[in-house]
Amino acid sequence: MKVKLKSTDSLNNFVATNEKGHQIKLAADGSSTGPMESVLMAMAGCSTIDIVMILEKMRQDLKHIEVEVESERREEIPRIFTKINLHYKLTGDLKEKKVEQAINSSLEKYCSVSKMIEKVADITSSYEIL
């Protein structure tokens, strides 16, 4: 796996490109996604993809899913995450026990991003079936 990052119009704005040509804009000045925000996005994406796949295997009728991520970082440098909560909102004909099992399986076993981050931050989750 390789990615490339280069500055764009200023030395505070960057574009990261993967081997397939997909891009993400990153910025240190708040004009686009910050690097730490991109980590939270990666965790949300990683776990949500897992959850969708797990629920499909469980034959659950998932119609829509979204996740809201809230975090806390320490004040000292490096400002690593100390707490992260992922709140999943799922729509469909779903059994609560299956949803809980899918979320736990993702965060505790399958999601590579959360497995890396759990070494430094307390990761919690919650959900609601709409």
Image (cartoon, rainbow, N blue to C red):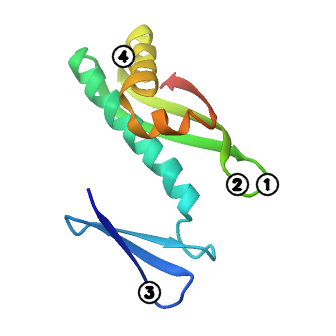
Q: How many neighbours does mark 4 have within 10 angstroms: few (below 14), some (14-19), or many (20 or more)?
A: some
Q: Is residue 61 left or right of residue 37?
A: left
Q: Which residue in the structure is indicated by mark 4? A: 94
- Amino acid identity at mark 3: Thr
Q: Amino acid at mark 4?
A: Leu
Q: Secondary structure at mark 3?
A: loop
Amino acid residing under circle 2: Arg
- Any mark on residue 79, and which? 2
Q: Which residue is mark 3?
A: 8
Q: Nearer the viewer, residue 21 or 128?
A: 21
> Element under label 1?
loop
Q: Earlier in the sequence, mark 4 or mark 2?
A: 2
Q: Position of residue 97 (x, y in %)?
A: 43, 8
Kindly report which numbered mark, 1 or 4, lies closer to the viewer in this rendering: 1
- The label on residue 76 is 1
* Drawn side of residue 56 relative to residue 68, left or right: left
Give whichever of discs 1 and 4 has the lower sequence position. Answer: 1
Say which residue appears at 40% left-offset and 19% top-offset. Answer: 105
User: Which residue is at 56% across, 33% downward?
Assistant: 118
Circles 1 and 2: CB atoms closer than 8 Å: yes
Instruction: Name the secondary structure under disc 2.
Output: loop
Q: CA distance from mark 1 to mark 2?
A: 6 Å
Q: Residue furthest right?
A: 75
Q: Secondary structure at mark 4?
A: loop
